[in-house]
Image (cartoon, coloured by chain):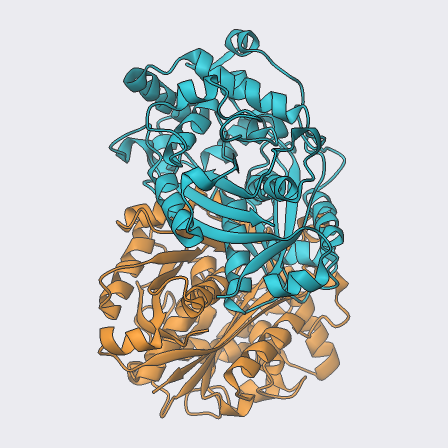
Chain colours: A cyan, B orange
Amino acid sequence: MRDVAIIGVGMQKWGELWKKSLRDIFVESALLAIEDAGADRIDSMYVGCMTSGLFVGQEHIGSLLADYLGVASIPATRIETACASGGAAFRLGFMEVASGMSDIVLVGGVEKMTDVGGDEATYALGTAADQEYEGFNGVTFPGLYAMIARRHMHEFGTTPEQLAQVAVKNHENGSKNPMAQFPMRITVEQVLNSVMVADPLHILDCSPITDGAAAAILCPVEMAKKISQKPLVKIIGSGQATDTIALHDREDLAYLKSTVRAAEMAYKMAVKTPENIDLAEVHDCFTIAEICITEALDFVEKGKGGPFVESGATSIGGKIPVNTSGGLKSKGHPVGATGVAQVIEIVHQLRGEAGNRQVKDAKIGLIQNMGGSGGSAVVHILEGE
Amino acid sequence: MRDVAIIGVGMQKWGELWKKSLRDIFVESALLAIEDAGADRIDSMYVGCMTSGLFVGQEHIGSLLADYLGVASIPATRIETACASGGAAFRLGFMEVASGMSDIVLVGGVEKMTDVGGDEATYALGTAADQEYEGFNGVTFPGLYAMIARRHMHEFGTTPEQLAQVAVKNHENGSKNPMAQFPMRITVEQVLNSVMVADPLHILDCSPITDGAAAAILCPVEMAKKISQKPLVKIIGSGQATDTIALHDREDLAYLKSTVRAAEMAYKMAVKTPENIDLAEVHDCFTIAEICITEALDFVEKGKGGPFVESGATSIGGKIPVNTSGGLKSKGHPVGATGVAQVIEIVHQLRGEAGNRQVKDAKIGLIQNMGGSGGSAVVHILEGE
C-alpha cells in the first residue's frame, strides 16, 4: 500500500444555514478543500452522510454532489455509518489512494439537519439506534447516553461537575474557532443549571443540531510533495470496528469496545502508543462520551476520565489536548460531516495553522469518530512534518 | 493490487417477505454465502442499501447487520448510490481485498420495501432523482424512464413491441430461476395490454417492488485456492462513474454516459472488449433501460438495441445472453440488493451451476448496476476457470 497524505481541507462556519441547501454547503466546503490543495482534478469521491433521506428527502447524493461540484463522471459514493459516516468515508478515501486505484480522492461529509422540526430530527437521529428494540421502547440518544453516564457515575464516582467540565473546556476551545456554531464560553454552573434533557445530561451536556459540510483532499505522499506547498500531513494509522448496535446487549455499558478495537488497529498500523499522541479530536456528542472515549483510547485508565478532564490534562496546554476545535459540543454536529471536520482540525494543528488554539509542537494527532451509542467507531492517526 | 476471487454467494427467494425483517433477510443471505464459501471468519463487511431510513426507519445498518450476523467487532459500512448501492459495495469489497487491507470480505445488499404503502415506496424511490428539480415537479421514476423511451423511439424508431420483448425474455429466464419473485412467462401481447404506467411504459415494462437480500464472499485468489472447493471465479475488471443526476441536464436523454464510462474502466482493467463477454447481467429496472444499456456496453451499436433484443441475440443461446437470472424485471428489484444478486447469477453461470438456464461455455461475465436514471453506474467483469 502507498503512503497517503492530506493536501487540502475546507469547511464553512457551521450553524443553522437556512439560506443554503445540502448541495450548496457541500460544494462550498469541497471548493475550499480543492483550493487549499492546489489540485487540478479529482479522480474519485466519497461523501459521508447519515440520513439525507429523512432530513431533506434526497438519497443518491454521490451522483448529486459530484454533479453540482462540476465533476459528474468520476466515481462518487455515499457512505453511511450513522454519526461515524464522515470517518468511514475518510477511511475509504485512504484505502483507495493507498491501494493505487486512484490518485486524488475527495472525501466529504455533509448533513442538513435544520430543514425539519425538532421531533423529526430526534426521530431521524434515532434511526442510528436499534429501532426494533431501542426505538420501539421510546428511547432516544440523550436517553441512551444518560444510561451510559449513570453507569459511569455508579461504578467510578464520576460527578455531574466532571461531565460539565467537558462542555466548559470544549466551549473555551470553540470560542477560538471561527467555524464553530456555538463559540460562547460557558461555566460549570451554567451547565448544571441548564434544562435537564435526560438525567444526568443537561442541554449543555449535549451537542447541537447543525447544518454543515467538510471536505479533505487525499493523494499519495510522493504526489503531495509535488502538488502542495503546505506542510506535509500523512495518514499513518486507520482502524474501524463495530459493537452491538443496542446498548442493552453489552456486558459493560460504560466501555466503548468499538473504539477500543478501532484504536488498537490504528495504533498498530501507525506503530504508535497513546503516549505518542500529541492531541486528539474525539466524538463528544454528549459530555459523557468524551470521558468514556479518553478511557477507550487509553489516554487515561478506565474509570478515571472524570478526574482527567477536571485536572486540565485534556485542555490546550495540558498533557493531551482533546477537541481543540471545540468538538461536536461547540463546533456543532452535522452528523455526516463531523468525522471529516475532525480531520480538518488535526490537519490545521499539524500544519501550525490553528491560531490562538494552536497546540505547541503538535506532530501526531488522533481522530475518533463514533456512530450511534458506540455501535461503530473509526480511528485515524495523522503525522505532521 | 492482489487478484481477488469470489468464493461464496447466497440469497433467498425474493418477494413480499412480510414475515421477515430487514435484519432477518440480510442474515439469511449472508449465512448462505458464508456456507457456500467455506469461510471460517469475516474480516470486514460492506452492505449496499438505498434507503432503509425511509423504508423501515433504520439507518446505521452496518453495525446492526454485523451485530445480528454475530460478527459485531469487524468494520462494517453501509454504501449508498441509489439502485447501484450493491454494485458500489461490491467494488469497495474488491478494493479492500485487492489493497491488502483485509483478506476475507463479505459484500451484501438488502432492501425491505414492502413494509410501506405504494405511495410511500414511490416517494422513497424518488429520492434517487434530483428532488429539488425533478421531484419538485412531480416526476417519478417510471416518468423519467418513459422520457428516455420516448426519445429512443423518436430517434431510432424503437417500438413498444421491442420494449416488451425485453420483459418477455427476462420472464422466460426468470421462470428457470427458483429465487425469482415473478417467475411466470409472459407474452408481448400481455405486456402491451397491461395497464399503462407512464406512456410508453406499461406495468409489465417495470421492475417490481421487492424485499430481498444477497451476499458474496471475496478473498485473495491465492487464499481462494486453499479455502474453496468450487470452481474459481475472479474479479478482473471494475469501473464506476457518474453522470448528471437530473435527466434534463444531459445532452442526450437516451445515452447512458455513466455506463459508457464505467464500462470503459472495467474493460480496460480486464483487458477485454465487448466481443470477449459471454453473458451479462444488466440493470433492467424498465425495459427501455436494458435496450440503452446493451448499447452503452457496446454489445450493439447505438440505436440498434431494439432490433437486437427482438433478434434473440440477448436470449439464452443467442450471441450474448443478457439477464439470464430473469433480471430486475422477473427476479425482483430490492434496490440495494440488486447489484450483489447480479454478481450471484454470473458466479453461478461461470461455475456451471445455473441449471436449465446455463449458458454453454460461459467463461467471462459482465455485471452492470445503475442508480437513478443513470446518475451512477458500476460495471464489473468476472472470469471463470
Q: Is residue B242 visible?
A: yes
Q: Position of residue B199 (x, y in %)?
A: 65, 66
Residue B333 versus residue B154: which sits nearer the camera? B333
Placement of B49 over or under A335, stated as above or below: below
Q: Is residue B116 visible?
A: no
- Residue occupying image coordinates x 58% and y 81%: B297
Q: How many marks?
A: 0
Which quadrant of the view contains residue B195?
bottom right
In the rendered structure, the answer to whether residue A78 lies left or right of residue A301 reads right
- Residue occupying image coordinates x 64% and y 50%: A216
Q: Position of residue B364 (x, y in %)?
A: 43, 86
Which quadrant of the view contains residue A14?
top right
- Residue occupying image coordinates x 55% and y 26%: A207
Q: Position of residue A111 (x, y in %)?
A: 61, 40
- Residue occupying image coordinates x 38% and y 31%: A295
Q: Residue at the front extreme?
A: A361
In the rendered structure, the answer to whether residue A34 lies left or right of residue A124 reads right
Placement of A340 over or under A195, stated as above or below: below
Q: Position of residue A323 (x, y in %)?
A: 55, 31
Residue A78 versus residue A255: which sits nearer the camera? A255
Residue A208 versus residue A352: which sits nearer the camera? A352
Residue A102 versus residue B297: which sits nearer the camera? A102
